[in-house]
Image (cartoon, rainbow, N blue to C red):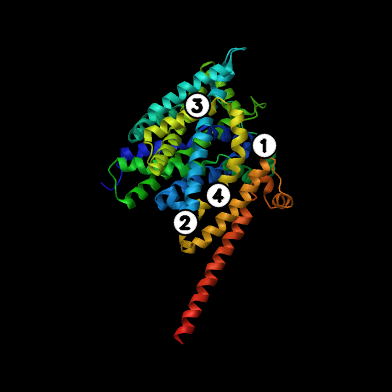
Amino acid sequence: MNKLSTKQFWMVGLMLFSLFFGAGNLIFPPMVGKMSGTSMYSSMLFFSITAVVLPVLGVIAVAKSKGLINMGKKVSPWFATLFTIIIYLSMGPLMGIPRAGTVPFEIGIAPNLPEGFASRSALFVFTLLFFSTTYWLCLNPMKMAERVGKYLSPILLVMMVLLFICSLINPMGSPIQPQAEYASNPYISGFIEGYMTMDAMGALNFGLVIAMVIHSFHIKEERAVIHSTIKTGVLAGVLLFGIYMMLAHLGATSISLYPQTTNGAQILNAASKHLFGSFGAILVAGIFMLACLTTCIGLTTSSAQYFATWTKKFSYKSWVRIWIICSLLLANVGLDAILNYSGPILTALYPVAIVMILLVIADSLFNGEQAVYKITVYTTGIVSILNGLSELGIQIPLITKAIEKLPLYSLQLSWVIPAIVAFTVGCIYIKAKKTRLITSVVEDKS
């Protein structure tokens, strides 16, 4: 068999959707909707460029390269190993998994605990149950499509659609004029918010999982695996876009009743309580729980699978246990602490991930020349690392000041212009090199 059946296609597509759809994906769109108001559609369109299109391109890039490690080898072998390990560790047990285990507690449970209740003890009990469930669901990765795509994802989608339909039947209000930065530029503001989801890094992790699941359906031909990955990636993107628009609508219509809300979690809590009363708190807790659980499953499976293949000293199940224990310990440090140390790391990593994705997609434009990859990726990496160090309060005389003067610095996009310049220089270099080579050959013949 060289292609997925219709049922398998939907299972894998739904699974990929839910792997992407974590807590950040729930929080950002309602706030974009609230702040953009009557400009919601244009803001969300640009939001989707960085929050939907880029992650889908990430899945396609990993599929085209036949794995993240091969993707990194387009730069150099040492970069491939280092980049892959850092991506899997940062999006896995060091940041991504602990954060996914903590967020549903902080947003869905902690606000509803009785006053004076020992929240630290409650966090430990919750994360113990959460990661025990994650561990069980990760033990057999071949059943991942069925457990996540067939059961958990549809339940999550039904909850989200139920919330949206009820907001149409019992509207909270109407969108108002755009607020703050959305009043002057709703397009760029939406684009930046989508960038902040950082889902492109998740795409690099999940590419391995998707390929593994597709292989489990007895599709062995590489071209068929790549084709199926691209198709399911597009389906996941369409589902993400649809849910994002629903969440943005909730935010846009909530502002007249709840103008004091300052983030997407507060908007969802307020809207659900308005629509469902006391049941609303349970609904929102369930949505955050499922969204974070499915993301956690994907991150644990992908990182454990990679390290089991790379080291060959421990089995896949052993790595799952190691990552779950590490994540449980880090999750109980608390969400604020995780966010504090993860911010600078993501600042340094994310631009490199984006540039790698775009270079692989555009590979044919420069014939996949390694020089272009090296110049562009290394330039982006240097600027991004300096930005990450700056977030940690580490200042390098003259260099830090120079970085701060780069265009788009205030938008956390100071790497964009250097990356474009480096790419252009790389293309000019290989063209000049080929011209010299052709000239040399002609002269030798004459």
Which of labels 1 and 3 is toward the front? 3
Q: Residues within 10 Å of mark 4 (few under 14, many from 20)?
A: many
Q: Nearer the viewer, residue 31 or 297?
A: 297
Residue type at mark 1 is Gln
Q: Are marks 1 and 2 in contact (CB under 8 Å)?
A: no
Q: Which residue is mark 1?
A: 177
Q: Are marks 4 and 3 in contact (CB under 8 Å)?
A: no
Confirm whether residue 282 shows in the render.
Answer: no
Residue 39: x and y, percent? 62, 40
Gap between marks 4 and 3, in whole Å? 29 Å
Q: Which residue is mark 4?
A: 352
Disc 4 secondary structure class: helix
For marks 4 and 2 on the same chain, the one whose residue lies earlier in the sequence: 2
Disc 1 secondary structure class: loop
Q: Which residue is mark 3?
A: 328
Gap between marks 2 and 3, in whole Å? 35 Å
On residue 74, the disc is 2
Gap between marks 4 and 2, in whole Å? 13 Å
Residue at left offset 53%, top offset 71%:
433
Confirm whether residue 83 shows in the render.
Answer: yes
- Considering every residue shown, the one lying at the far bottom of the view is 446
Q: Are marks 1 and 3 in contact (CB under 8 Å)?
A: no
Residue 260: x and y, percent? 67, 26
Q: Residue 301: which quarter of the image? A: top left
Above or below for 374 versus 104: below
For marks 1 and 4 on the same chain, the one whose residue lies earlier in the sequence: 1
Residue type at mark 4 is Val
Disc 3 secondary structure class: helix
For marks 4 and 3 on the same chain, the one whose residue lies earlier in the sequence: 3
Q: Nearer the viewer, residue 184 or 441?
A: 441
Gap between marks 1 and 4, in whole Å? 36 Å
